[in-house]
Amino acid sequence: MTKIQTDALPAISLETLGNQIVDALSQEIISGRLTPGQRVDLSYYATQWNISITPVRDAARKLEALGLMEIFPRRGVFVATLNDRDVKELFDVRIALESATIRLATPNIPREEAEKTRQLYLQAGEKLHQHSVDQSLPAVDLLIHKLALQYCDNVRLTKMMQEMWSQIEWCQNTIASQLQEPFLTTLPEHVAICDAVIAGDADAASLAMYRHLTFTSERIQKLLINMG
């Protein structure tokens, strides 16, 4: 059964309809409103957006290609699930791509932006120590990763990372968030990446990113094994 929606769905305009449907459905999954393994009633969304079922089905097929949905003939459409192997494969690719991304980006990232990012991490960590958690924490958690993507200056690498980004955020929102004190655990790892970028040391930044993502992958896989 489709989860009952309590919040109004975003409006869909006819302009770039297909892309908007893909974005809207992916946000339903990434945000956790649709949960792993849940059956998705595509007709519900077609009715809510006052559109035909065809573009919604097309969007579901695109999300299947992105790894967010699974389509089974005669059974229906379901939100994909993430097991320990899925996470390992995702992080294996992510480690390779993001280590290269931060290496390429380091010479291009303005020092003041890197310093500002470092300060934002420290401020968010202080809020956690004071038990004052706000909704901006997930965005701060990915800040150095997005900064690297912004400044890597490699079109092909950027496209590959963008195609993975929905899965990265989905994994973070549905699994990584269950780790005990995940932000405080990764805080020194993020700060180490920032320090290397501020110093202009691309190799050190790449190594710090590699270590951070490797440790994160191990933590999440251990969580999944324990949950299983």
Image (cartoon, helix red, strand yellow):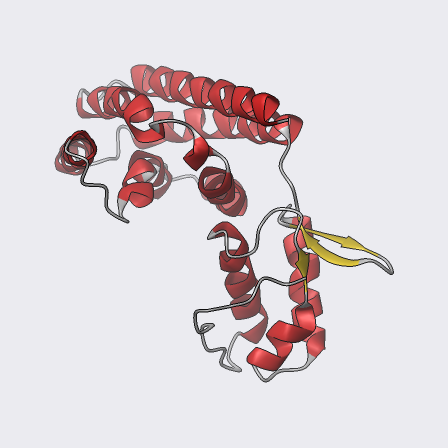
Residue 160 visible to an observer of this rendering: yes
Which residue occupies the foreground of this view, 192 or 50? Answer: 50
Residue at point 58%, 62% (across, down): 3
Which residue occupies the foreground of this view, 96 or 65? Answer: 65
Q: Position of residue 171 (x, y in %)?
A: 51, 39
Quarter of the figure that contains the C terminus: top right
Residue at point 67%, 69% (across, down): 42
Answer with left or right where residue 219 lies relative to residue 56. left
Quarter of the figure that contains the N terminus: bottom right
Answer with left or right where residue 26 lies relative to residue 60. left
Answer with left or right where residue 182 lies relative to residue 70. left
Which residue occupies the foreground of this view, 209 or 138? Answer: 138
Residue 47 against residue 56 in the figure, above or below? below
Residue 6 against residue 61 in the figure, above or below? below
Residue at point 12%, 36% (across, down): 112
Q: Quadrant of residue 140?
A: top left
Answer with left or right where residue 135 lies relative to residue 225. left
Residue 48 against residue 23 in the figure, above or below? below
Residue 102 against residue 5 in the figure, above or below? above
Q: Quadrant of residue 145?
A: top left
Residue at point 31%, 45% (across, down): 139
Q: Position of residue 124 (x, y in %)?
A: 19, 36
